Amino acid sequence: MRRPPDTVRQGPPPPPPPFTFRRMQPDDLDRVMEIEKDGFAHPWSADLIRRELAHDWATILLATERRGHGGQQAEVVTGFVVYWLVHDELHILNIATAVEERRRGVARALMQETAARGRKAGAVLATLEVRRSNAGAIALYRSLGYRQVGIRPNYYADEGEDAIVMIADL
Ligand SMILES: CC(C)(COP(=O)(O)OP(=O)(O)OC[C@H]1O[C@@H](n2cnc3c(N)ncnc32)[C@H](O)[C@@H]1OP(=O)(O)O)[C@@H](O)C(=O)NCCC(=O)NCCS
């Protein structure tokens, strides 16, 4: 006998959350700074973010979602990543997800989108530095194929913390 439909999984698993991505515009600065300040004890300044926006080799990519119904829909920026594309190398400088949006796959989706964009632009290697104590971020990067290749002692001047250098093939 067939089981009732509500206990049978029909077809493939449900799709992941509908993230979309776009480059940051100057108007997004307040939201990006809000996420940045909530994410880091020593956040980047608004000036530093503005400077990144002006560099040809830098991209600030936002993860966004549309929320609400019908005419009430609005875009919510859930996270961002800052990366540089120099020759055949992609360098991730900064990534953060809004506190209330964490553990929903936003950062993973941003990293995957960044890798795809890097590959398309000819990058073959991705690099990043991460604080030794940032277990969550390290777990994220490992799950995406990043491996530790070195340590930069006292890299973060504020607390004298070491950076772990990680790379991944694209
Ligand atoms: C690190 C950070 C960007 C992760 O963002 P996120 O959107 O919550 O991450 P995701 O939901 O995409 O997580 C993907 C995977 O990464 C790992 N991960 C993410 N956050 C984690 C945490 N706090 N502890 C352990 N593992 C974590 C898990 O493997 C997770 O998969 P799972 O949820 O299926 O277990 C976010 O916590 C953040 O903004 N932190 C402050 C800023 C920061 O530290 N940035 C990194 C600088 S190098």
Image (cartoon, rainbow, N blue to C red):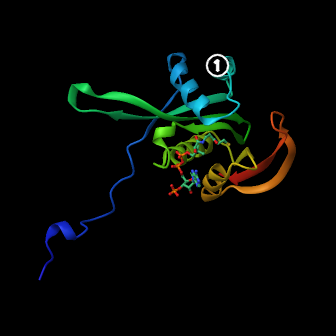
**Above or below for 7 versus 2:** above
Horizontal side of 158 relative to 169 (left or right) equals right
Q: Please name the amino acid that badge 1 sits on.
A: Ala
Horizontal side of 72 relative to 15 (left or right) equals left
Q: Among all residues in the image, which is located at the extreme right? A: 153
Q: Among all residues in the image, which is located at the extreme bottom? A: 1
The residue that disc 1 covers is 46
Q: Residue at x 51, y 38 (%)?
A: 99
Q: Residue at x 11, y 83 (%)?
A: 1
Q: Residue at x 64, y 19 (%)?
A: 46
Judging from the image, what secondary structure is the residue with disc 1 in? helix
Q: For residue 110, what is the image quadrant?
A: top right
Where residue 73 appears, as percent x and y from the top left, is 29, 28
Q: For residue 169, what is the image quadrant?
A: bottom right
Q: Residue at x 60, y 53 (%)?
A: 140
Where residue 113 appears, as percent x and y from the top left, is 53, 43
Total numbered circles: 1
Where residue 29 appears, as percent x and y from the top left, is 55, 20
Where residue 124 appears, as percent x and y from the top left, is 69, 48
Horizontal side of 165 relative to 118 (left or right) equals right
Frontmost residue, 87 versus 136: 136
Query: Ligand 1 within 8 A of label 1's CB?
Result: no
Frontmost residue, 142 versus 131: 131
**Above or below for 95 versus 59:** below
